[in-house]
Image: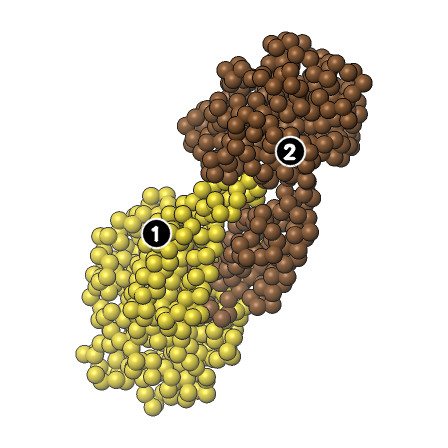
Chain colours: A yellow, B brown
Amino acid sequence: MKAHTGLRINTDRLMMSIEELGAIGAYRDAEANVMGVRRLALSAEDGAGRRLVMRWFEEAGLHVSVDAIGNVYADRAGRDASLAPVMSGSHVDSVPTGGRFDGVLGVLGALEVVRTLNDAGAMTRRPLTIAFFTDEEGCRFGTDMLGSAVATGRIPLEQAYALRDADRKSVRNELQAIGFLGDEAVNTRRPHAFVECHVEQGPLLIHEGIDLGVVSGVQGISWQRLTISGASAHAGATPMHLRKDAGLAAAMINTKIHDMCAHGDYGSDMRATMGVIRPEPCMINVIPGRVVATVDLRNPSDDAMHRAEHALDAYCRELERTMGVTIVSQQTARTPAVAFDESVQQIIEAAARTQGLSCRRILAGAGHDAQEWSAVCKTAMIFVPGLNDGISHNPRELSTPEQCANGINTLLAVVLALSDEVA
Amino acid sequence: MKAHTGLRINTDRLMMSIEELGAIGAYRDAEANVMGVRRLALSAEDGAGRRLVMRWFEEAGLHVSVDAIGNVYADRAGRDASLAPVMSGSHVDSVPTGGRFDGVLGVLGALEVVRTLNDAGAMTRRPLTIAFFTDEEGCRFGTDMLGSAVATGRIPLEQAYALRDADRKSVRNELQAIGFLGDEAVNTRRPHAFVECHVEQGPLLIHEGIDLGVVSGVQGISWQRLTISGASAHAGATPMHLRKDAGLAAAMINTKIHDMCAHGDYGSDMRATMGVIRPEPCMINVIPGRVVATVDLRNPSDDAMHRAEHALDAYCRELERTMGVTIVSQQTARTPAVAFDESVQQIIEAAARTQGLSCRRILAGAGHDAQEWSAVCKTAMIFVPGLNDGISHNPRELSTPEQCANGINTLLAVVLALSDEVA
């Protein structure tokens, strides 16, 4: 590693590549009044974006292969072909109204690492692999991290193939349609380590003025859809004590979950959100008789998550008794917490420190390909802050060249350190 | 009055008339699986309903006239033509998905009073007037109690004429279209007293097992539309302390207004409802950045209402400071409380007592024609309980023949008592 510690990426080249890929699927977002990106998984735009990045991989001298779920791998030889490679990458698909950085920074950042090594004529001990994975966003076929989950064995290939979008088009057909039904077998790659650079998609780093996040893990997620049934009645004619106000029950659940975050025994990283609230009939002078509401809980501790779910359920039962409503809960998602590898986190911290960058441990609030790879190799992530409070899944998503360079220079140092490891 | 104290209405005739009028504009309500009524003000159905009732008025020997806003009056001579008449009535228009009793009970009940007097060959000292008023519901042209408000001088005739429905059709044109642009001048009738029988449209009487409500007044109404602006952000990536959750602010306002009813210093009859809650973007994993919500406050005391509005506003300012949201309030309706005449209420109570019926004072939660007439003469109302928790504005609205007969026999006794008053 020592031989290459002075290497720095070419920031202009990185930003130009991000810009160029961002033009594929670009649209003018009327609300945000900026250009956004719409490159839904396995759409024609996704296909065009994939082909551009593959061309860049090939121009960088990499050996490109596509697996059966459309994941793309670009391999660079190391000095010792017997050692497992260090892998870095992310995704190039986007949400329907996305920005230019989500996923792309991790893919083109890994490409920039290779380009920098190429410029320096540097060869690493271990082979390197850059990759991008199919349908990380899950917006089109309903399952996020689809490609990396198939690549690491969590989701069977045939199950993934059978998923359909809103137009009943299957993953398999759409892979074929854009020419990415590859022939490499899935669930065969076992890297030495996986490291992914990604925009934070949150406000913490920019708010605290910290250069980089060292991602300690991914929060567990619990999604519930609550159907609260009370009695719709006249707002003027119904005395307070004879009401069964489903909207009030939803409000009390919303304040309760916030109170659990602030004062509960569920850890300081618990997060809770009621994003959906749909009262019926939703008229000014009618007491809501029915409300559909959602609760999104996040926690890095599976134990704390379990206790929080239990407390929420107990509170709903209490509201049923005291308010005369019924509350039916349907679990719509449940993923366990993922803890990233401590040694990789320490390598990231050392690399940041060496470059004079401030960093802090941070939890990933969203799902990432890295959490799938953490099942098969040691893994961690680098978070880059973003302007506009770190907004993401939005055309206003924006990280500066300096912020991106901090992340990718650190990725370069981390890849070099990991690729130098013998065991 | 004594001469007629033994009179009882013909309940079968009353119920058959209600049934017959309910067939005009009837529709099968798929959700409730019963027949409902759709007789929107000044629609063809309203015209047909009006003509049926007018025919019944004429068959009862009454002198029918129509005023310039389409209100219909049916006069019956008294022994002393120099005395002002006792008036009773209500409305025959309905909400889009209404029942058979709302308004109709008061009109056909007053007709049944006259029919009963006719059968007995009884003549009252004062003249009697039965009336029904245009567009009490306000569903089509946006202003409720329109006809009675014009008849009593609160709303100028030309202003009422200019109101338009969703298809831009004006009140004046639609009156003409159904043949009810009458020639009697408005704001000229000054009855001795006005008494209206109406279904309760609430659960209080049926819940307490009480036969009749003696309406002490109509609550003041304050409607506000709140636009709460926070910041939309990722539910996973945004720490709790960096959020501006507009949905949480709405929830806290909802619990606050209920707390004000339960523990505040605004009187035990204060009612508060948040009927509309519309979060944006309304997605499970996005913190609501904006919520439109409504607050409906009711209070029989204008002073208490004023203090409650002030307290709510102060709470919104507090949330702005503590939560970083902005809350813009728009007042969309504001009507003062109406107190009905104490002496008429006592006459109703005495009439109920004489017939062995239980009664209690009760506040009207909804608007009624009687509140307009209370501006020009002594006025009160009789409430009849309904099954299904007193549900109204719904095809399931239902009062039994016994419940209806209790109300209209009491109305008969009250009309006789009032019509015997010399001053």
Q: Helix or strand or loop: what does disc 1 sit on?
A: strand
User: Quadrant where the N terminus of chain A lies?
Assistant: bottom left
Q: Position of residue A169 (x, y in %)?
A: 33, 45
Q: Position of residue B30 (x, y in %)?
A: 42, 29
- Assess disc 2: are there few (<14), some (14-19) or many (≥20) residues with their C-alpha within 10 Å of its C-alpha: some
Which of A147 and A277 lies nearest the eye of the viewer? A277
Q: Is residue A240 visible?
A: yes
User: Quadrant where the C terminus of chain A lies?
Assistant: bottom left
The chain identifier of the residue carrying mark 2 reads B
- State the residue at coordinates (67%, 24%): B417
Residue sticking out furthest to the front: B2
Q: Which residue is mark 1?
A: A329
Disc marking residue B346:
2
Left or right of B151 in this view: A287: left
State the CA–CA distance, disc 1 to disc 2: 52 Å
- Assess disc 1: are there few (<14), some (14-19) or many (≥20) residues with their C-alpha within 10 Å of its C-alpha: some
Which of B366 and B350 lies nearest the eye of the viewer? B350
- Which three-letter amino acid code belongs to the residue tagged 1? Ser
Residue sticking out furthest to the left: A82
- Which three-letter amino acid code belongs to the residue tagged 2? Gln
Disc marking residue A88:
none
Left or right of B176 in this view: B398: left
The reply to the same-chain question for discs 1 and 2 is no
- State the residue at coordinates (52%, 32%): B358
